[in-house]
Amino acid sequence: MPDAIAILDFGSQYAQLIARRVRELHVYCELFPWDAPQEQMEAIQPKGYILSGGPNSVYDPGAPAIPNFILESGLPVLGICYGMQTLTHALGGRVAASQEREYGPAEIETVLPNPLLPSGRQRVWMSHGDRIESAPVGFQVLAASPNSPAAAMGDVAARRYGVQFHPEVHHTPGGLEVLRNFVVGICGAQPDWTPESIITQAVERIRTQVGGQRVLTAVSGGVDSSVATALAHRAVGEQLTAVFVDNGLLRMGEREQVRAAFEGTLGPRLVVVDAADTFLQALRGVTEPEAKRRIIGETFIRVFEHEARKLGEVPFLVQGTIYPDVVESSAPDRNKAARIKTHHNVGGLPEGLTFRLIEPLRYLFKDEVRAVGQALGLPAGLIWRQPFPGPGLAVRCLGEVSAERLEILRQADAVFTDELGRAGMLNQREREAGGIAQAFAVLLPVYSVGVMGDQRTYHETAALRAVTTEDFMTADWARLPYELLARVSSRIVNEVKGVNRVVYDVTSKPPATIEWE
């Protein structure tokens, strides 16, 4: 078992960012609800604990609190924002409402040399209403800001620390180094969580779970399902059959691309199932986004069950579920975060599932999945392929889904991605330098009047979405050149029958999500 850090989620929607930053340090970690059972947290044999932020005041009725067993463990503790406040409150310090809420960029200055913070001044990101008025016995103030006399504190001997700022966000430039100092330096965790170790552990788990039984894998052609399939194939070889369902909700040319990828590199035999009519019939008349996702999730499973019966007894199903899917769906083991949307492969799964699921990527972030794919030797074109939601174009075709509307959307999307590709703007590997991480078209059930060839038109609207991001948990809209947008708009309204207006989405995540549904 690799060295691990346990992260307690006190209700922050972005607690998972802490986990991602720790993983970037090549240290394994898991995110737990703050009141998870002691044995569950201790099962990973943590080298230390990190306490996340949260929306509460420590004085709220029923406010989340640090469990006593953590304080009694003698292990290092780092409290972030509310985590710092609940640590202070539990140890007898004083937390009070700040006269001025501190939200956004701030500057702190280290006032005492310590193992956690660099010396001097540094820019940080604050987001809090309460602050520390007096530190607990044994703690010293390590850093201060104009509005936070205790912007950081620590009991060096007991290896307990608190920071009022958020080191996990990119708005704190030195935040990763602060986390490194805690995780590696103070906790002594070895940075051995590497793609190679992930592969080794995943293969061992799959072999132990499956034994000599047969396995189906659900593939979409995206990086997640492809990497999950490659891991399963390495683990069980010929026991694996890959099933690709053409649900009629695919992008242009997707079926052919998936077939070519599997025939060339992925190993297991591929069964292609044409289920477009089945899915479209199930979605007929449905417009509510969550209903779409649930229907698609259940239909997927029923199709796989049907294929499994044709193949004989196949008790296992491999899915490419990744950690953001789990977080956004508020899966049962992550029930402290608010549900944003149901992912077809998490909260959209039906009751009475006949398969036992294998999800080797369930707690990996997208960048970890890609790193594992590279280590497995998958082709770059597959690893860096444009992300595509499991429910497919159904969540980009707002309103009722029909074959006709899907074809309109498919063509508009192809035009957009074609022009971005021609401009050299779809290289995922360049996203940290401001490159586009994801781009697609959305078909809106909004009709408007237009004029084409001196004739009045009354057609639907296509929305374009392009974002930059490092982690897909937050994202900003891409500042595309006007000339490029003009070309895309002109081509869509001229080449795609049924669209006479094109708009561009300039909303970040949050408050929006990347997908529209």
Image (cartoon, rainbow, N blue to C red):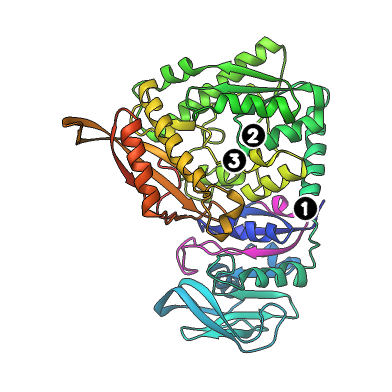
**Sequence order check: which comes first, mark 3 or mark 2?**
2
Read off the residue under disc 1: 194
For the residues marked 1 and 2, what is the alpha-carbon distance in whole angstroms? 20 Å
Q: Which mark is residue 385?
A: 3
Read off the residue under disc 2: 225
Residue type, mark 3 in image: Arg
Above-or-below relation of 108 to 31: below
Q: Residue at 62%, 27% (x, y): give it.
A: 258
**Sequence order check: which comes first, mark 1 or mark 2?**
1
Identify the element where label 3 is drawn. Answer: loop
Instruction: Find residue 71 and report its horizontal and vertical position in percent.
Output: 69, 68
Q: Quadrant of residue 80?
A: bottom right
Q: Quadrant of residue 267?
A: top right
Q: Residue at 53%, 47% (x, y): give it.
A: 426
For the residues marked 3 and 2, what is the alpha-carbon distance in whole angstroms? 12 Å
Q: Residues within 10 Å of mark 2 (few under 14, many from 20)?
A: many
Identify the element where label 2 is drawn. Answer: helix
Question: Nearest the camera: 190 or 263?
Answer: 263
Q: Quadrant of residue 333?
A: top right
Residue that lies at the very extreme toward the bottom in this rendered image: 111
For the residues marked 1 and 3, what is the alpha-carbon distance in whole angstroms? 22 Å
Instruction: Find residue 483 and report its horizontal and vertical position in percent.
Output: 37, 51
Question: Nearest the camera: 192 or 11?
Answer: 192
Q: Which residues are the magenta region?
A: 37-66
